[in-house]
Image: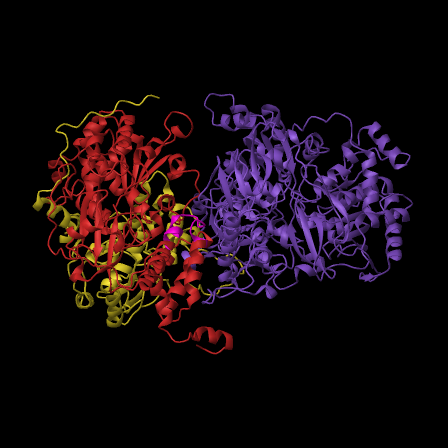
Chain colours: A purple, B yellow, C red
Amino acid sequence: MTIAPDKDTKPVPDGYVRLTIDGIEVDAPKGEILIRTCERLGIIVPRFCDHPLLEPAGACRQCLVEVEMGGRPMPKPQASCTMTVADGMVVKTQHTSAVADKAQQGVMELLLINHPLDCPICDKGGECPLQNQAMTSGRTDSRFVETKRTFPKPLPISSQVLLDRERCVLCQRCTRFSEEIAGDPFIDLLERGANQQIGTAEDMPFQSYFSGNTIQICPVGALTSAAYRFRSRPFDLVSTPSVCEHCSSGCAQRTDARRGSVMRRLAGNDPEVNEEWTCDKGRFAFRYLQSKGRITRPMIREENGELVETSWTEALRAAAHGLLAARGHNGIGVLTGGRLTVEDAYSYAKFARVAAHTNDVDFRARPHSAEELEFLAAHAVGTTPDTGVTFTAVEAAPAVLTVALDPEDEAGIVFLRLRKAVRKRGQRVFQLGQWTTPGTRKTEATLVKAVPGAEAAVLRELISAAGEKDAPASELIDALSGPGAVVLVGDRAAEVPGLYSAVTALATRTGAKVAWIPRRAGDRGALDAGAVPTLLPGGRPVADAAARAEVAQAWGVHELPATPGRSTDEILAAAARGELSGLVVGGVDPDDLADPALARRALREVGYLVSLEMHHSAVTELADVVLPVAPDAQRAGSYLNWEGRLREFPSTLDPSGVLPDCRVLDTLAVEMDADLFTQTPAAAMGDLQRLGAHTGTAPAGPTVEAGAAPRPAEYGQAVLATWRQLVDDGSLSIDEPALAGTARPARARVNAATAERLGLVEGLEASVATDRGAITLPVEFTDLPDGVVWLPANSPGSAVRATLGAGHGSLVRVSAGGAA
Amino acid sequence: MTLPEGNPETNSRVAVAPAERTWTAQPDQGPVSPTFDELTRQRAKGIIARYPVARSALLPLLHLVQSVEGHVSQDGIRFCAETLELTTAEVSAVATFYTMYKRTPCGEHLVSVCTNTLCAALGGDDIYAALKARLGIGHEETVGEPGTTGSITLEHAECLAACDLAPVLQVNYEYYDNQSVASAEALVDALRRGEKPPPTRGAPLTDLRTVELELAGFTDDPALAAAAVAGPSAAPETLRGVQMAAERGWAAPAMPGEHPALPPLPEK
Amino acid sequence: MSTPDKPEKASGLDTAGPADTGPGPEGPAPLTPVLTRRWTAERSWTLESYEQLDGYRALRTALTAHPDQLISLVKDSGLRGRGGAGFPTGMKWSFIPQGSTGPGAKPKYLVVNADEGEPGTCKDIPTMMADPHSLIEGCVITSYAIRANFCAIYVRGEALHPIRRLRAAVAEAYAAGYLGKDVLGSGFDLDIVVHAGAGAYICGEETALLDSLEGRRGQPRLKPPFPATAGLYASPTVVNNVETIASVPAIVAGGSAWFRTMGSEKSPGPKIYSVSGHVERPGQYEAPLGVTLRQLLELAGGMKDGIPLKFWTPGGSSTPIFTAEHLDVPLDFEGAAAAGSMLGTTAVQVFNETVSVPWAVMKWTEFYKHESCGKCTPCREGTYWLVQILERMVHGEGTAEDVETMLDICDNILGRSFCALGDGATSPITSGIKYFRQEFLDLVAQQPAVARPEQLAELTGAPA
């Protein structure tokens, strides 16, 4: 090999240093950790405690190398995971230094003396860094003939994480993760010296929404998953890249399947999105796939009112027949939920216009408003990572305000980014909310407190007060006026009249960028795919004749319905009144809607109901035809995450025998004499992408005035605040007892003054009631505003919409004890 | 050459094996018990006020807990966690790291026998073995109902930094110097009878909880505190060098009469 | 390497009485009480007594100076850290960034390491008991020099009486205006907290001490950043030993030239030598740095009962042992190092021929195992292993390979562990085998063929 003669003369780039590793000269950015520079050169130094996303520890000492600085060899081998590169440094790894090699072998021997030889029964066996490195740098025999340290095993540290302490090499990746990344220091080192071990307090398990990540980063088999333990061997698994369906973050994942069953899911490595993390719901909640309630065959309701299985041909023909009749009578509405992929949502959107001849299509299976549609048209639809806010932008922002969004519960990866930015860069986080949630605390957020329903008024107040001297409001407004500041709005904003408008005003006032973070994975894609009453695919306004013509031409139809459609609530109300004759419903739970009772009535009253579902549900119970659809694992597709980033995934399991919504709709449309060209997800995506984005100017945002805060009118009344917690009774979290065990306990929260006034005692039960029903939960004191009670929206014993028919900002009655 | 009899047991603590648990759902952390009364809470605040950052108060707070409970219980851990806004895991991590925090209820007195090399060679191992036999207990075990008069927790300790007075033992961290098997046995016998033989150096003997309160930085009785401070300190051994120098007329070179001028301000 | 079956008769054993050497014409006296000079005073721990013996006069002088002048003075004096490592004190102080921006703008802290726990070491506890005000005066001067307004004295928790004395002295100093707001009208503010540890040898390591002082497990921190830039609460911090800080008032009072009349060029000043073990008169002997064991033995009345010296530590158990061949090694930083050990804490532990070296090494190794913090693999697992080998050997179940295995394990710990505790743990073993290898082999030879019941039980499944 010849060395290029000009090598020495090449200048070191600015911000870089030049060093030599195993005889290879390399330029590395200043401050880079030596072990990473080695990696970039393809030189792998063994390690356990080192993890690129955790603070260096230098604890395991496995990565020792020899280092020469300024021509002088350092007296001791150095841990390459803690040392930063320096100009002129000469590094010799185990490949070129006998000292480094012996040091590494010595540490390996010491790590193994107390390690059990239980690889054959260890979950990690076959994918274990300790096993691998013991093979490469360990001894073939052991000099250790003494007594090994043993512990009772396994020790559950939560309902879903098990700990085998004797396998642990005390690298502290798990404790550093839980302290640094998640902010949940519920596991820690206990004892000292040779007795040192990982553990929890006696009275508190490892209660973290992100605990599963510790299983994944454990470099040995010390932390294992209760749900996965002993289920399969790594070499038995077929791995497929996947995307999480549980929220709008769109985590990259890897799904491991064995003989047609999903065994586990792991976080994928996507530095732009989820880095190497994923939340426990995303990791563990996949058993709905195999649940007993899965519908596998089409069903049709017979004269006697019973649903019976039938053939696809029969079911589709019946559905088409019923829908055509309904279309000819008072028309059809199309309702979809949050689980849809972009391809499916597009198919529904196109089905509505082309087959149902209507703009009555809405993906918002939750409280919503007309104001929201205006806001989405102005701030959300069509944004991409190139034009809108991204995870990276959130991390880089000097200040972030969250509105109607508790990131830890509703967008876990956003929470992790905020926490990272707060810890590493001192980002200021503001949260417009009701109380200091765990997430508020862990992002050191400044809580801007508002009575539920008064959020818009509070924001308006802040904006107008900001000019005044020494106004406390100025702090927030000033922070958001800094370049790169971001406002993150959750879809709960629709529950507060004027809030989307106030956010728009705030953005105008400060120049902060606005991002919309819906809770569900499919919402953003459905918006852009046109599953909205006022927008066609690509954000084209229905009201815009040119846009309609453009789409009609692309779709090969004469014209599209010109009247803007009705919203979910309006569609349901119309159906209940008999003003709509048919409904096509996919992935909607009536209990998620603003008025579950109205939704049920509409489903009952509507002339013809077609349901596309995975599981038996409140909708299938009433449907005339039920068409089974495929879960994500059995189909390809994509989600658009809240950034507007397309997250494509292939099918994990054999897709034969099940059909995605797009295929079912395509065939149904054919039966109704319309062509969707969505036979496959790829076809649907191609069709959508050919349409391209809307080129018109974005409308200005909504200008709805802030509503007045509701006020308790009589003794015993309170304003309800509510949202969903990450781990709750969600329909995709069924059959996961291990995951459910880490749910935050359902509590009715009030502040101490309110409790005293209402005679509530912390720890004892209180009842929160409306005319429709009551929820009884133990009371916990928090810093809520006076006269406000908070309930988790869908936790065990606290199904707020279903039980109370009430929501955020509603007036409820609160009393002590179990009776309403 | 004879091998000294001894090394009664290894110095490792008994391997800790928490009871098996299952977590089905997050258990409720009950409120801290009223054992930690208003006075204790006030004292906790006083400790926190000493430091620029509250968490520095954790070690003294755990001493305070021991002054209340005689050991650190789960309740005590919760008290510290609540006071400093830490998780109980974080407090447990600290409480289990340090030898002086005891996990099981202790006796009125804690008898610590130095069995490190030098004391052991001079008789410390024999003393420890004799006390074990006499009291019928082992390391970190207690004879008598914990906390009652005459109850004793025994431990072998690492170097107690009194090697010129070896072999030494401590009762509630007060020094008993130049011990023998006989003197140590007599000492624990007296303690068992409820007597409080004065230490060689230190304050009049009290009990472990009182001493833990002192370590936390508080004394209940100012008069007793003054007496405690005035307790004997310099053993004859401590003063040997300085006394010998005085007798021989040896001294450090004389200092200049006036304090010499300080060096000039270094140039920047 | 000599492996004396019978060590040469230790010199000094014949000298039953006190040494008869007076001050030489040039050098100072054999004993130079500076730090210990007030120890015999009536109620020496009180402010009254301290003030009568020129106490707090150095502080008044110091407060008239510019802080940087004090740093220069201590640099000039050549004072080196008395906690074991011997780092130049003035240089440590000068590393503290000063200024109105960057790390210099943060608050600065002085932390006194009074976590005396190294086996054999017993100098700081008598200092704090007998003369707490010298330490406090040193703290005030040092804090003024480095511009610290908060000082913590971290005393090991088992040192109850010194904690009492220090706290009482701190209270007296506050009342007399030596502490608190506007010390002696100088405009300088200082608060001192006496902080009780809770039993962990590792907290003598300065970064572990800082973590412990911050209410955490006392485990060492990564360096860099060093405490001088990011110490207590991530602010610039000086960590000094008790004896170091207690030396400061004397240096201010006597000047650097005076301080240098004792000791050597590179190791100037007086030092408290704690002589313990098999000598007639164990105790604290304050002598100029560079005194030899032969001289110390003379002062301490020679070997107890005339039984010959076998081995000794120059500065605690972490310093490799010496034998009778090292009687004349000058006990200063350079001399001890040149002879293959370290000065350490000048904890001179003397053992006579009755003591088995493998046994002593086993006891020390048990200590390091018990006190290993557990953070890094080599120290945690290495000490766990070494203890088992040594206990097995001492109980007559050793093998000839064990000696080599131990040396290799030590090689895998020394310089591979996170902090110096791991290194220290290897000192007794490697130095013990170096000078007394035959004694380890004899232990093996004395035993019948090795039968390890617990191993057999493991193989056969039968109970041991």
- Tell me where residue A228 appears, x and y as whole percent: 62, 60
- Relative placement, left or right, of A240 versus A711 is right
Query: Residue B206 lies in magenta, yes or no?
Result: no
The correct choice, above or below, for A268 with respect to C361 in the image is above
The N terminus of chain B lies in quadrant = bottom left
What residue span does the magenta drawing correspond to? C412-425
- Relative placement, left or right, of A712 versus A305 is left
Residue at image position (60%, 32%) is A487
Q: How many marks?
A: 0
- Tell me where residue C226 appears, x and y as whole percent: 40, 38
Query: Residue C420 lies in magenta, yes or no?
Result: yes
The C terminus of chain B lies in quadrant = top left
- Tell me where residue A594 appears, x and y as whole percent: 66, 44
- Relative placement, left or right, of C72 versus A748 is left
Residue at image position (52%, 34%) is A88
**Is residue B219 in sight in this rendering?**
no
Q: Quadrant of residue A690?
A: top right
Q: Nearer the viewer, residue C195 or B35?
A: C195
**Is residue A319 in sight in this rendering?**
yes
The correct choice, above or below, for B163 with respect to C76 in the image is below
- Relative placement, left or right, of A492 versus B265 is right
Q: Nearer the viewer, residue A546 or C354?
A: C354
Q: Nearer the viewer, residue A618 or B185?
A: B185
Q: In which quarter of the image is residue A509?
A: top right
Residue at image position (84%, 31%) is A548
- Tell me where residue B23 appears, x and y as whole percent: 52, 60
